[in-house]
Amino acid sequence: MDLQIKRSSNFIDFTLQRDKIPILSLDASYMINNEIGYIKVNRFASTTMQEYKDALKKLEKKGIKHLILDLQNNGGGYLKTAVSLADEFLKKEKMIVYTRGINNKNKDYFSTKKGFFVEKKYRIAVLINENSASASEIVSGAIQDWDRGIIIGRRSFGKGLVQRQINLIDGSVVRLTIARYYTPTGRLIQKEYLKKGTDNYKKEIKERIEHGELKNEDSIHFDEFLKFFTLENKRIVYGGGGIMPDIFIPINNVGVTNYYSNFFRKGIIYDFMVKFFDTERSKIEKHFKNFDDFKENFFIDDKILNLMISFGEENGIPKNEKEFLISEETFKIQIKALIAKNLFGENEFYQIINELNMPYQKAIKVLSDKKIYNKELKKI
């Protein structure tokens, strides 16, 4: 198939060829420093474990010792994949998750082998937030309950229902809840449903925001009957829906203003990047031959920012000087990350955008210091 694309005033010819396009479940995997590696999983799919193992092999060659497993905004996926990933971090025959239902056969899932991080006893940090659900909660709950790693971020969503899909003759389906997921200590992953009602259940994240839970750990209250103890170090953890992290990190709104949000909500920042690359890509490629050079020496200057501001004005976003100054550094990181993505790829995008990822930054500090890590696990 032949296609013409207009860029500025020029038409460029392309020939398109039909092919299989893989939908990957790993967004990024790279070394942060000489010892700490990073893997971000966006969902638990049928290909996730192979993607994970391929990524880990590359990180092993680069000397990985400790891992940041990023499950933020991971809404879940296959139970089998969640169990397999948790299996990579736990000793043999450790409970990973179990299901219980009134009229459904109970099932227990155990670890089966020693993974790379088990044999080496390397340190693990798992990142979660209010959008981490289902399979993400199975993995983070098992790691927390067995004191195998530090959970960092904010309380996860709280989705732990086993559902059976029934196909109807008109093509529609009914999903019938038949059981619930529990972590190894016996914590119910599913947040309260019946008492809240359907509408309030769906709005529960909004309630967290209104109550200040995403900004202040003191806004989170647990009943004493929801108290559980981890299986190795007897640390206190709480049930009641979702996984509460060991280290709470408030949501990061630094640099986020209405002016900044408009660029992303309306897609203007991406349109700007297309236009910017049409004229500047060859210059950037000429000056920066590799990502390390780009990361260290490429800076978003006033010229680029002014071009962005003008483009925004042309597309219905009038400049707000006060809000721009608040958001300026955040704009710079976002723009640089998007440039890196276009020039080098997803891994490089995350290496820059993670400067805004506060749980990620905290995880680096915790994994870098064995005493801090062990103190969080109460091993010292």
Image (spheres, grey):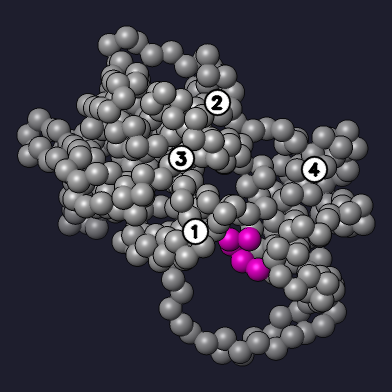
- Is residue 15 covered in magenta? no
Q: CA distance from mark 3 to mark 4?
A: 27 Å
The circle drawn on residue 214 is 2
The circle drawn on residue 329 is 4
Determine which residue is flagged by label 3: 125
Q: Residue at x 35, y 37 (%)?
A: 148
The rendered magenta stretch, by its main secondary structure, is classed as: helix
Residue 306 in view, yes or no: no
Q: CA distance from mark 3 to mark 1?
A: 17 Å
First-in-chain label (3 vs 1): 1
Mark closer to the observer (2, 3)? 3
Where residue 134 sits, quadrant-wise, is top left
Mark closer to the observer (1, 2)? 1
Extent of the magenta region: 344-348
| Three-letter residue code for mark 3 | Ala
- x and y percentages locating residue 119 in the rendered image: 31, 50
Quarter in which the N terminus is drawn: bottom right
Q: CA distance from mark 1 to mark 4?
A: 33 Å
Q: Is residue 266 left or right of residue 41?
A: right
Mark closer to the observer (3, 4)? 3
- x and y percentages locating residue 257 in the rendered image: 75, 35
Residue 8 position (above or below residue 146): below
In terms of depth relative to the viewer, which is nearer, 1 or 324? 324
Q: Which secondary structure, mark 4?
A: helix
Q: Is residue 204 left or right of residue 105?
A: right
Q: Residue at x 63, y 54 (%)?
A: 351
Quarter in which the C terminus is drawn: top left
Determine which residue is flagged by label 1: 63
First-in-chain label (3 vs 4): 3
- x and y percentages locating residue 226 in the rendered image: 30, 16
First-in-chain label (1 vs 4): 1
